[in-house]
C-alpha cells in the first residue's frame, strides 16, 4: 500500500503587527482548528475548508495509507516565536522520520511565515523535511494565495500548489489538487521541471479579490494554460506586510520539459505585470465611509457592508481597534460591527448580566497608533460562551470558539465583543450573540476580502474603510527595511532601496 506522511503548519506573518504567535496560539487555533496530533489529525481534517482535509479525502479515495504527524494553525499576527516554530516543526519532522519508509509527503502550509529567528519559515520547514526523507521521495505542499514564495521553497519541494480564490473558498480543493499531483508523480516515477518568477511590485490585499477583475481574469487564464505538458501552474499574490527578501507576488510552474514550465510561467507573469495599473481602488475614511453608507441605506433593501480593512485579524490585525465603532456612533448610524476582541470587557459584560448597563474602556488596548480604548456606557443585550459552527464558504463548517462573548449596544449600534480574535468572515459571527446580519442597515466587518464569500450575497453594496490599524491598506506606508532591492512597494510606486527604509503617503 502507498504510504504518505502528512502534516500542516500555517501562519501568515505581518512583521509590523504588535503581537507574536506563541505555541498557545497554535494550540487554540483562533480561526483555524485547534492543534491536533497523530491520529487525531485524520479525525479533525474532514469535511472542512482546509487543504489537509481535501488531501485526506482524495488520498483515501486512492487507497493510500496516511501517516499523520501534526496539524496547527494560528490567527495571523507578528512573528511566530522560536519556541512555537521549533516545537511544532520538530514534532512534524520526527513524526515523518518515525514513520519509516514512506512513498511521499504532503504538507499543508501557508507560505508567508516569518519567525523570530528565521525569515523564511516555510523554506526551513521544507528543508528539514527534505533532509529527513532524502532526495528521492516526492514532497508536495499546498500554499495560501498570499504566500511569499522563496527560491528555497521551490528548491526543496517537488511541487507547490496555491489557492486560486480570495476569499479562500478553495482551500480543500487545493488539497485535492495536491493529492492528484502527488499521484501523478508516484505513477510516473519522474520529477517535473520547475519555473519560478518573482514579480516586481507589491499588490495591496484589498485589490486581490478574485471575484473582481483583474484577478478573476488572471486565474481564468492560468487555469486554461494547464495541460498534460504543464500539470500545475500557480500565481500567488503574496502577503505585502512581511519585511524580508522574498515578500511579494510570484508565479511557479511545473512542466514536462523546462521549456514547457518556462513558457507557462512567463505567460502568467506577463499577464499580471500588464495589469499593474488595475490593482487599485477607492478606500474611504471612517466618517466618509459611514456617511456614504447611511445615504445608501436609506433606499437599500439589504445591508451596506463595510470592510474595516486595516484591523483585519486575518492579516495580523489585533481585532480591537475602535475607529470604525466611533464613526458609527458619532454619525448616528444604525447597524452592527465586530468582532472586537477584548476579554476584559467580555468578562465585565458576563458579570453584569443581560439587561445591565456597563461602563467600559472597550478595545483599543493593543497600542495601535491613532487608536485608544473607547470609554462609554453600553447595554448588555445578549451573552454567549463563544462556541458555534461557522457554516459559510470561508470557514466551511468549522467549530469556532471565541470565548466568553457579548452583544453590547450603544445608541442604535450593536457590537460583537469576544475573548479571542478571528476574522469576521461568516454571518454566524453575528448570529452567535443574537444579531441577525440581514436585518441591519450597516455592517462593519473586521476583514479585508474573506467576508465577501458569505456577505456579498446579502449586501446591497460593499465599501472599504481605513481606520487606524496594524495592516495598512497601502503597503507603501510601511517602514520597509529588508525587501529585495528594486521591488516597487505598491503598483506604480517607488522602488525599494535598502539604504533607506520606505515610507510614503502615496
Image (cartoon, rainbow, N blue to C red):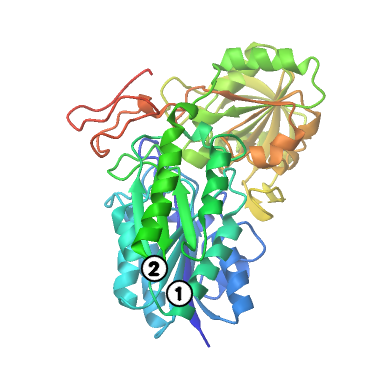
For the image shown, how many numbered marks are present on the structure?
A: 2
**Residue 351 vs residue 119, the one in the foreground:** 119
Left or right of residue 149: residue 48: right
Question: Residue 436: which numbered mark, if any?
Answer: none
Judging from the image, what secondary structure is the residue with disc 2 in? loop
Q: Residues within 10 Å of mark 2 (few under 14, many from 20)?
A: some
Give the image quarter of residue 443.
Answer: top right
Alpha carbon of mark 1 to alpha carbon of mark 2: how far? 8 Å
Q: Is residue 286 above or below residue 102?
A: above
Mark 2, residue position = 192
Of the numbered discs 1 and 2, the one sitting upstream in the chain is: 1
Q: Name which quarter of the figure residue 426 lies in.
A: top right
For the residues bearing labels 1 and 2, Cβ distance under 8 angstroms: yes
Residue 185 numbered mark, or none? 1
Residue sitting at x 51%, y 53%? 225
Foreground: 143 or 332?
Answer: 143
Amino acid at each position: 500500500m502507498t504510504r504518505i506522511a502528512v502534516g500542516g503548519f500555517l501562519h501568515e506573518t505581518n512583521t509590523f503587527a504588535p503581537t507574536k504567535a506563541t505555541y498557545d496560539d497554535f494550540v487554540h487555533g483562533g480561526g483555524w482548528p485547534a492543534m491536533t496530533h497523530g491520529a487525531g489529525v485524520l479525525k479533525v481534517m474532514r469535511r472542512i475548508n482546509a487543504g489537509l482535509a481535501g488531501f485526506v479525502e482524495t488520498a483515501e479515495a486512492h487507497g493510500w495509507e496516511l501517516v499523520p504527524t501534526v496539524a496547527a494553525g494560528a490567527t495571523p499576527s507578528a512573528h511566530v516565536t522560536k519556541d512555537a516554530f521549533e516545537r511544532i516543526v520538530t514534532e512534524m519532522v520526527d513524526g515523518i522520520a518515525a514513520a519509516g519508509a514512506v512513498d511521499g509527503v504532503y504538507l499543508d502550509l501557508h507560505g508567508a511565515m516569518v519567525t523570530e529567528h528565521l525569515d523564511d519559515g516555510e523554506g526551513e520547514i521544507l528543508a528539514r523535511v527534505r533532509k529527513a526523507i532524502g532526495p528521492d521521495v516526492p514532497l508536495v505542499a499546498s500554499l495560501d494565495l498570499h504566500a511569499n514564495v522563496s527560491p528555497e521553497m521551490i528548491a526543496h519541494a517537488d511541487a507547490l500548489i496555491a489557492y486560486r480564490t480570495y476569499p479562500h473558498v478553495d482551500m480543500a480543493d487545493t488539497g485535492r489538487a495536491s493529492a492528484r499531483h502527488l499521484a501523478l508523480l508516484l505513477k510516473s516515477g519522474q520529477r517535473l521541471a520547475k519555473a519560478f518568477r518573482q514579480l516586481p511590485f507589491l499588490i495591496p490585499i484589498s485589490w486581490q479579490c478574485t471575484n473582481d477583475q483583474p484577478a478573476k481574469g488572471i486565474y481564468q487564464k492560468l487555469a486554461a494554460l494547464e495541460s498534460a505538458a504543464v500539470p500545475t501552474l500557480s500565481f500567488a499574490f503574496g502577503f505585502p506586510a512581511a519585511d524580508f527578501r522574498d515578500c511579494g507576488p510570484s508565479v511557479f510552474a511545473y512542466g514536462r520539459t523546462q521549456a514547457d514550465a518556462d513558457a507557462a510561467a512567463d505567460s502568467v507573469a506577463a499577464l499580471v505585470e500588464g495589469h499593474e495599473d488595475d490593482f487599485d481602488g477607492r478606500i474611504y475614511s471612517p466618517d466618509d465611509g459611514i456617511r456614504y453608507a447611511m445615504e445608501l441605506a436609506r433606499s437599500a433593501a439589504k445591508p451596506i457592508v463595510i470592510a474595516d480593512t486595516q484591523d483585519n485579524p486575518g492579516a495580523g490585525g489585533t481585532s480591537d481597534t475602535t475607529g470604525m465603532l466611533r464613526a458609527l456612533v458619532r454619525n448616528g448610524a444604525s447597524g452592527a460591527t465586530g468582532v472586537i476582541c477584548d476579554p476584559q470587557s467580555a468578562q465585565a459584560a458576563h458579570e453584569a448580566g443581560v439587561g445591565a448597563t456597563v461602563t467600559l474602556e472597550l478595545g483599543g488596548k493593543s497600542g495601535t497608533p491613532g487608536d485608544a480604548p473607547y470609554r462609554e456606557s453600553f447595554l448588555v443585550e445578549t451573552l454567549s460562551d463563544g462556541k458555534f459552527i461557522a457554516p459559510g464558504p470561508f470557514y466551511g463548517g468549522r467549530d469556532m470558539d471565541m470565548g466568553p462573548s457579548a452583544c453590547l449596544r450603544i445608541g442604535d449600534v450593536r457590537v460583537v465583543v469576544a475573548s479571542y480574535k478571528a476574522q469576521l468572515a461568516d454571518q454566524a459571527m453575528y448570529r452567535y450573540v443574537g444579531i441577525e446580519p440581514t436585518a441591519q442597515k450597516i455592517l462593519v466587518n473586521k476583514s479585508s476580502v474573506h467576508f465577501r464569500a458569505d456577505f456579498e450575497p446579502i449586501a446591497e453594496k460593499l465599501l472599504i474603510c481605513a481606520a487606524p490599524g496594524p495592516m495598512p491598506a497601502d503597503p507603501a506606508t510601511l517602514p520597509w527595511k529588508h525587501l529585495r532591492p528594486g521591488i516597487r512597494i505598491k503598483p506604480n510606486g517607488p522602488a525599494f532601496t535598502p539604504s533607506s527604509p520606505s515610507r510614503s503617503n502615496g
